[in-house]
Amino acid sequence: MATEGIEAVFLETHNWGKAAKFFQALGFELEFSTDHNSGRLRNGDGPYVFIAEVPEDREPQTQIVLKVTDAETFRPDPAVEVVTPFEDTHYGTTEMTVRDPDGRLWSLQAPSKN
């Protein structure tokens, strides 16, 4: 079974408000924001962008999220290094982390069965 392409781009920022305005100026619409300086924006039918504010002493990270239909039936090819198997997240999905040949980490997400 393969992934279904890019689900989302997860961005960390030092200023949620400025980051959200930047993406809105590029045509993204705010779908929702949380009460802890984060939120989801979308432009058309493409992947969504989720932005979360982090403290100034932390380097902002970027992660691309690949979509998986069913975590229970997904079996990665042996060429894919699994760093962490599928685990439930606090945001309603189940997530696996894999590493590409250059050492980058990728998030694979599927709907939670809970």
Image: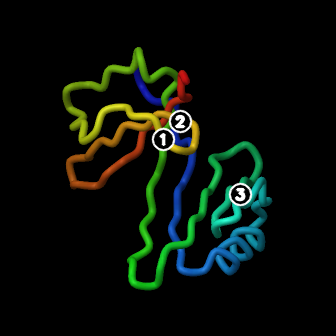
Against 48, residue 73 (above or below) is above
Q: The residue tagged with tag 1: helix, strand or loop?
A: loop
**Distance CA(mark 3)–CA(mark 1):** 20 Å
Question: Mark 2 = which residue?
Answer: 93
Element carrying mark 2: strand
Viewer-side residue, 95 vs 42: 95
Name the image colouring: rainbow
| 2 vs 3, front mark | 2
Q: Nearer the viewer, mark 3 or mark 1?
A: 1
Dot label at residue 89 = 1
Whole-angstrom CA distance, mark 2 to mark 1, is: 6 Å
Q: Which amino acid does label 1 sit on?
A: Thr
> Tags 2 and 1 in contact by the CB under 8 Å rule?
yes
Q: Vertically, is 45 above or below 28?
A: above
Residue farthest toward the top in the current orientation of the protein: 73
Residue, disc 3: 41
Badge 3 marks a residue whose secondary structure is strand
Residue 37 pos. (x, y %): 64, 69
On screen, 10 above or below 16?
above
Q: In which quarter of the image is the N terminus?
A: top left
Where, by quadrant of the figure, is residue 72 drawn?
A: top left
Estimate the spatial distance between the alpha carbons at disc 2 and disc 3, rounded to whole Å: 18 Å
